Image (spheres, rainbow, N blue to C red):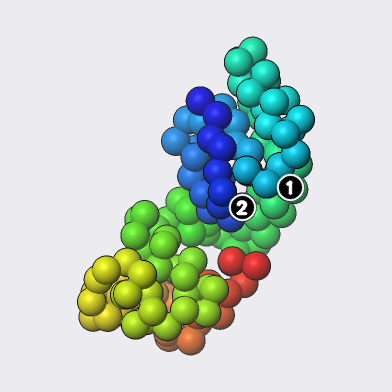
Amino acid sequence: MLALSMHDELTYGERCLKAGAMGYVMKHEPPEKVVEAIKAVHEGKRFISDELKARLLERFFDDKDKGTNPVEVLSGRELEVYTMLGKGLSTREIAGKLSLSAMTIESYIENIKAKFNFSSIREVLINAIKWTL
């Protein structure tokens, strides 16, 4: 399977590949890259766009220092909340986007804090921002 996505976020690419996709290419890629990806996957090869490949490598080496990778540690919903926090959204904004209550979002944030052993919400926010860069 080849994932063709409008999302150029590393999180989606990483999740698709971990779920078994043979390739991941973004819709904004030139048509020849998309064709190259289709051919590669059809031949049983993996295809990852150059941009995503570079970001995956960067994340891999950064995560070695941190010791944990949010994609591996957090549930799907927690990862969504963590990513949105990293993009600067408030609890209420996240709640609105996910059609959940602000209290539910606060519970997710507390779970994230516990899973990473962060001592404060501030630490959650700082790390979420760094991770989404």
Residue drawn at the location 58% of the way across and 55% of the way down: 9
Residue 73, given in percent of the width and then of the height, sits at: 42, 56
Q: Amino acid at mark 1?
A: Glu
Q: Label 1's element? A: helix
Q: Is residue 38 above or below residue 97?
A: above
Location of the C terminus by quadrant is bottom right
**In the displayed image of the protein, which residue is found farthest to the top?**
43
Q: Amino acid at mark 2?
A: Asp
Residue drawn at the location 44% of the way across and 36% of the way down: 19
- Assess whether mark 1 and mark 2 are in contact (beta carbons under 8 angstroms): yes
Q: Nearer the viewer, residue 110 or 68?
A: 110
Q: Label 2's element? A: loop
Residue 105, given in percent of the width and then of the height, sits at: 30, 75
Distance Cα–Cα, label 2 vs label 1: 9 Å
Residue 116, given in percent of the width and then of the height, sits at: 44, 68
Residue drawn at the location 61% of the way across and 52% of the way down: 8
Q: Is residue 46 left or right of residue 126?
A: right
The crowding category of the residue bearing disc 2, from other C-alpha atoms within 10 Å (few below 14, some 14 to 19, many at least 20), is some
The crowding category of the residue bearing disc 1, from other C-alpha atoms within 10 Å (few below 14, some 14 to 19, many at least 20), is few
Q: Disc 1 designates what residue?
A: 51
Q: Nearer the viewer, residue 114 or 2?
A: 2
Residue drawn at the location 68% of the way across and 32% of the way down: 34
Res. 14 in view: no
Residue 46, given in percent of the width and then of the height, sits at: 64, 26
